[in-house]
Image (tube, helix red, strand yellow):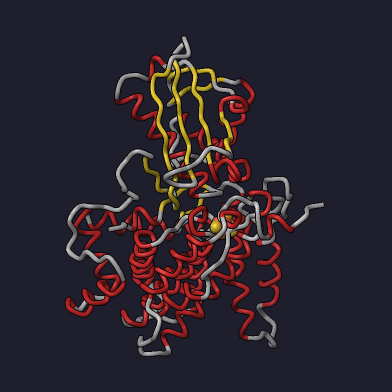
Amino acid sequence: MISVFDLFKIGIGPSSSHTVGPMQAAHHFVARLIEEGRISRVASLKVTLFGSLAWTGKGHGTDKAVILGLAGEVPETVDPDAAQRLVAAVETEGRMLLAGRQPICFDPAADILFDRKAPTPRHPNTLSFTALDEDAAVIAAERWCSVGGGFVVREDAPADLGAITAPVPYLFANAVELLCIGRDAGLSIAAIVRKNEFSLRDEALVLDHVDRVIATMMQAIERGMRTEGALPGSLRVRRRAHALRARLESDTGRNDLAPHEKMDWVSLYAIAVNEENAAGGRIVTAPTNGAAGVIPAVLRYYRESCPGATQEGMRDFLFTATAIGGLFKTNASISGAEVGCQGEVGVAASMAAAGLAAALGCTNAQIENAAEIAMEHHLGMTCDPVAGLVQIPCIERNAFGAIKAISAASLAARGDGSHLVSLDQVIATMRQTGADMNSKYKETSLGGLAANFIAC
Ligand code: SF4
C-alpha cells in the first residue's frame, strides 16, 4: 500500500527526484554513520551524481540538496531561506558540520562529481556517498536511487519502492481490485483509503497530516500569487502569477466575462505553486515537485467554485487521489527520469481528476473513469526541461494538467462510469510508453524543447 503520507509530502522545491530524494538519501547515509558510531571518524566526503542526476542536477539543485541532507536537514522541516544561507557558507568555506555536529572538509565544487557516463543499473537517478577518514581511507560507501516523488531506496536493497507492507484491511493491486472492494464492501474509494490509513496510524494523526497538506498547498498558492521577480537560474524567467492575479481581479466586475475565463484562475493557482517550487520554496510533493501545482489548483477550484464544497470533501479528494497515485507508482512509475512527464504531470492530473470526481459525489466507477480519461490524454508526454530547470515547460504544463483534470472529472460525472479503456490498461500503456521512450526525453534535457529553445 502507498500511503497518503508517502504521496503527499511537505518539502521544498524544485524537484522531488532531484532535490527531495537526494536530500533524503544524504540524510539517511549520515544517520547510519551516527547509528553505527562512525561519524566522529569522518574527515571528508565525496558524492557522485549519476545518470539524470548528473545531466540535470545543477538546474534542479541536487548539489545543494545533498549539502543540506549531509548537514542533517530533512525536506519537511528545512527552512528554505536558512537553507540558502547554509549552502552558501559551505560553498565559500569548503567546510561543513556533518549532521550539524562533525566538522569535515567539504568543497562542493570538488567533492560533488557529476558523472554522465557511468551506467545506472537500477535507476537513472543514482548517487553515491563515500565517507573518508583523515588518512583518506574509506569509512563507509553507499549508493542510493531516487526513484521519483521523493522516494529513495539503497541501490542494493530489495525492490522496496516505498510501499507499506504491513497488513491493511483492503489491499488492492490494481483498479479492478479496488472497484471490487468498493462494490463488495459498499465503500467509496476515499472510505477504503481512510480505513487502510486508520489501521496503520491514529485517525487524528492521519487527518492532521491531510489538513496540513491542504493548508500547505493553499499557502503555496498564496505565496506564489504575492511574489514578484525572476526565478533562479540561467533563463531569468519572470514570475507571472502576481501580475496574472492582479489582471484577473480587475476583470471580476466585467459583465462580458466568458465562461472559459474561469479556467484562467485555475491556471493561476497552478502557476503560483510551480513558481514557488522553481524558487525552492515550501510546497507539497504531489506526487512529484515538478507536478506540484496540479492538485492544489484543482483542490482550490473545488473549494472556490463548486457549490457545497467542504473540508471533508477536500479530505476525500486527497484520499481518493492517494489510491490512484498508488496504482501508478506500483504498476508504472511517477519518475520523469523513468517514463517522462506523463509520469509526473500526467499522474498528477489523473489523481486530481479522481479526487475532484470523488469530492463532487461521483460513484467509484465514475472516479475510475475520470482518472483514466485524464491519463489517457497525457500518454507519451516527454520530459524536456529547458536548461535543466523545472520551469519551462513545467510551470505552464501544470496549469494544463489541472484544466485537463477538471474536464476529465466533469466528463466522467456526466457518464455512468462505463467505458471501454480501463484505468489499468492506461497505466500499463503509460509504463510501456515510458520504457520505449528515448532517454533524451527522460529528464536529461537532451531533447525536445530543451534542445530547440535557444535562450538569448
Ligand atoms: S517536464 Fe515534467 S517531468 Fe520533466 S521536470 Fe518538468 S514537470 Fe518534471
- Find ligand 1 in the image and state its quadrant: bottom right
Q: Residue at x 29, y 72 (%)?
A: 189
181 or 306, which is in the foreground? Answer: 181
Residue positioned 56% across, 30% down in the render: 112
Placement of 62 over or under 161, stated as above or below = above
**Taking 411 as reference, is 210 left or right?**
left
| Spot occupied by residue 239 in the image (x, y as percentages of width and height) | 69, 56
What x and y, as percent, mark residue 451? 70, 55
**387 or 312: which is nearer to us?**
387
In the rendered image of this protein, does residue 8 appear above or below residue 138? below
Q: Residue at x 61, y 48 (%)?
A: 279
Q: Is residue 105 placed above or below 28 in the rendered structure?
A: above
Q: Work out whether residue 239 or residue 183 is closer to the camera in this orientation and state it.
A: 183
Q: Residue at x 42, y 58 (%)?
A: 333
Q: Residue furthest top?
A: 135
Name which quarter of the figure residue 286 lies in: bottom left
Judged from this view, the residue extending furthest toward the bottom is: 415
Question: For the image shown, how many numbered marks are present on the structure?
Answer: 0
Is residue 222 shown to the viewer in this render? Answer: no
Q: Position of residue 40 (x, y in %)?
A: 38, 16
Query: Which quarter of the rendered picture does the N terminus lie within?
Result: bottom left
| Residue 415 visible in rendering | yes
The image quadrant of residue 274 is bottom right
